[in-house]
Amino acid sequence: MLKNNIIKIINEKSFIYLDEFLKIAHQDENLGYYTTQNPIGKEGDFITAPEVSQLYGEIIALTIINKINQKKIKKFELVELGPGRGTLMKDIIRIFKKSLDEEIDYSINFVEINKKYRSELVIEFPNCKLHSSLKKIKNNYSIIIANEFFDCLPMCQISSVNGKLYETIIKIDNKSNLVFDKSAARKRVVKEMGLKLKDGDFYEYSEETGNIFNEVTKIIKNNGGFLLIADYGYIKPTNRNSLQSIKDNKSTEVLSNIGEQDITYHVNFNQLLLIAKKVGLKNINVCTQSNFLQMNGINVRAEQLMISNPKSKDKIMDQLSRLTNSDKMGNLFKIFEAEY
């Protein structure tokens, strides 16, 4: 069991930091949640926007086509981070076949660590290229998309108490249970974070997010390209703990079911903004999922679907509501776009 491996590490070190815990829980090669489990869908632990409705992927596809036509691109690399079962890409490719000029050449690239999903992707997309990182993407115009990818990467929590900085850690209590606690913040993390916290501030920071997003932005700048990141999160720090866990589409305790449940947090989009600006990307925009989908024609597309499938009208309306309503996915999820 993965929990026993973590307990062994804690016994040797007295505690582990939150980001270390998350990396083991999600990415352990043999027992990690994202390497071995089947997390997505009604039979899994959570449902993503592409699983809610084909409308979502269709709007993403049309956004990409508009960009390709605008830039007069004839060849490009389409890269998806964390595609899972490939639901989003299926919808994109279906629209490409209908609306993308046949003379335009593109290659499908997936960055995925889940063993089961990697096998399924090769069957579903026989000409795709599977990667474990972004280092082998070809030097063509690149479009990089990611839907609910960054919200589960290892993350640190830093708090300022009486002038001192602390980090969230996991240790073992006197009943041999895993529990949260605090310890002095690592100097390296504080330096990388690059912020001065006021007394009482609480800040969530992901070094791995920074590293991966730096790679993404450099590919876009070096190759020319466009990126679209979708996740739930915030632009202005909320000063609160957003760590949560889900199993079987229900909330759970974060320190239970280790390696068998999804542990996520709200993405700090300000961290992505700062990186994109520093690299020099252009036309940077962050908006709510609702605004993005509606600005790019989801209501029109939904009407078209209802006309062609009148018996599914209520279902389509419900899907549209889930994607765009402010009390559902509409405002909580953000879309980050940038290009070069």
Image (tube, rainbow, N blue to C red):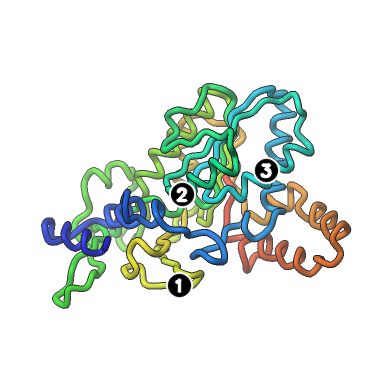
| Residue pictured at 51% horizontal, 24% vertical | 138
Mark 2 sits on what residue?
150
Instruction: Answer few, some or many: residues within 10 Å of disc 2's Cα (few below 14, many 20 plus, some between 14 and 19).
Output: many
Q: Position of residue 309 (x, y in %)?
A: 84, 60
User: Looking at the image, which is closer to me, 328 or 60?
Assistant: 60
Q: Is residue 109 above or below residue 171?
A: above
Marks 2/3: CA distance?
21 Å
Q: Quadrant of residue 257?
A: bottom left
| Residue pictured at 53% horizontal, 57% vertical | 232
Instruction: Answer few, some or many: residues within 10 Å of disc 3's Cα (few below 14, many 20 plus, some between 14 and 19).
Output: many
| Residue pictured at 22% horizontal, 53% vertical | 185
Marks 2/1: CA distance?
19 Å
CB under 8 Å between callouts 3 and 1? no
Q: What residue type is disc 3 on?
A: Ile
2 or 1: tag closer to the N-terminus: 2
Q: Is residue 131 visible?
A: yes
Q: Is residue 69 above or below residue 92?
A: above
Q: What residue type is disc 1 on?
A: Ser
Q: Which mark is residue 92?
A: 3
Mark 1 sits on what residue?
251
Q: What residue type is disc 2 on?
A: Phe
Instruction: Answer few, some or many: residues within 10 Å of disc 1's Cα (few below 14, many 20 plus, some between 14 and 19).
Output: some
Q: Is residue 254 above or below residue 305?
A: below
Q: Quadrant of the C terminus?
A: top right
